[in-house]
Image (spheres, grey):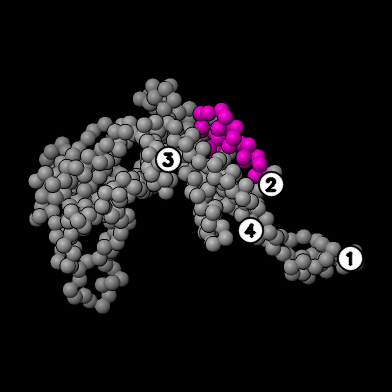
Amino acid sequence: MAIAAANLMSDAHEGIGRIGRIPVRNLWLLMLYASDLFRVLENKNVAVEDNPDDIPNLVAEMLCHQVERRIQRNLSYGYQSREAVLGRVRGRIDLLNTERHRLLDRGKVACRFNELTVDTARNRYVRAALGEISKIVDRDGLTHRCRSLAASLRRMGVTGERPRRGEESINRFGRHDAHDQPMVSVAQLALNLALPTESAGTKNLSLPDREITWIRKLYEKGLAGFYDVVLSGKGWRVDAGKTIGWLVENKSPGIDKILPSMRTDIILNHSNAGRRIVIDTKFNSVVTRGWYREETLRSGYIYQIYAYLRSQEGNGDPLAESAAGLLLHPSVGDMVNEAVVIQNHEIQFATVDLAATAKEIREQLLQVLELRGRF
């Protein structure tokens, strides 16, 4: 964006883009954590935290590899609806246009038919991802490779406009096109990396709300993806977005229509160790101004995590009896890591500094779990 706050000018000169006060490269890191690709990289021992600025190059390499692989094995085809005036019947006859233009007098007929083509929404989406990622990589050879592959797709017939991201045909895979899934996953990440920043640029965009929904969701999904990959091999089971119910003993006829359900962000279970940690992510400050003091924890969030923990007692699940809660907020500079035990449930209030280095963010995400069991 062509918006540059005074306190961001030094970072802009250093080439560090930001959204609000969060470096774009750390948002790239969260996107990688939220994607399925992080599991692949972790298994290959690729330490992306060592150089988060290289994430676009890494994603571009993977995208080029997947596209080249699909080209070698032939791109997936799909059916596209077409209308044309032909010398023979194909598909269904368009009687209205045939009669209106007196096509039969010339030995022609208007037809509507489905044609098999590579110009599908999915292939156009991948071509668009190649074009976007080529703008942010910093290796000349890789930039040329992305643009060359995009041009190859055009020559092969992928010439339509970029589809909307939510188009169903992009993410719906069948038995015949399952090999497209890795390519599409990388393409989605590549398009997500093309973020606006507050550094001066060539295009002007309106200033979004600093706490927009997509960043909050990204924070939640990124943390869930990180813990799933890092902890699943150590005996932990990670559940993201799980709905838990109330232990209802009796109810009136209409209560089901108005009683809200409870949806947790992340639940960590370790059956052998007898531990459960319920994590609730909030994309705002962990403390606020109180009536009689400068800072106080947000009471509504405490009530929420308390309800998550106490409502599950007595249901026959031994992990629920001493489950711990963790309210995990982002911060920029100011760190909080405090805990209290309430009725046999430890509740921790912690922050992750999204302005820190990528390696520090990884260490902080693991350290907040190490605090448990100190009481």
Judged left or right of residue 1, residue 330 is: left
Tag nearer the camera, 2 or 3: 2
Q: Is residue 184 visible?
A: yes
Task: Let me know if residue 331 is in the magenta part.
Answer: no
- Image location (x, y in percent) of residue 348: 17, 46
Disc 3 residue type (three-letter): Pro
Q: Sort mark 4 into few (<14), some (14-19) or many (20+) by Cα contacts within 10 Å.
A: some
Depicted 237 relative to depicted 54: above or below: below
Please give the residue where the numbered disc 2 appears in the rendered image.
Answer: 156
Please give the residue where the numbered disc 3 appears in the rendered image.
Answer: 208
Depicted 301 relative to depicted 65: above or below: below
- Image location (x, y in percent) of residue 81: 68, 61
Q: Which of the two discs, 2 and 3, labels the residue nearer the N terminus?
A: 2
Judged left or right of residue 361, residue 277 is: left
Please give the residue where the numbered disc 4 appears in the rendered image.
Answer: 78
Disc 2 residue type (three-letter): Met
Q: Sort mark 3 into few (<14), some (14-19) or many (20+) by Cα contacts within 10 Å.
A: few
Question: Residue furthest toward the front?
Answer: 44
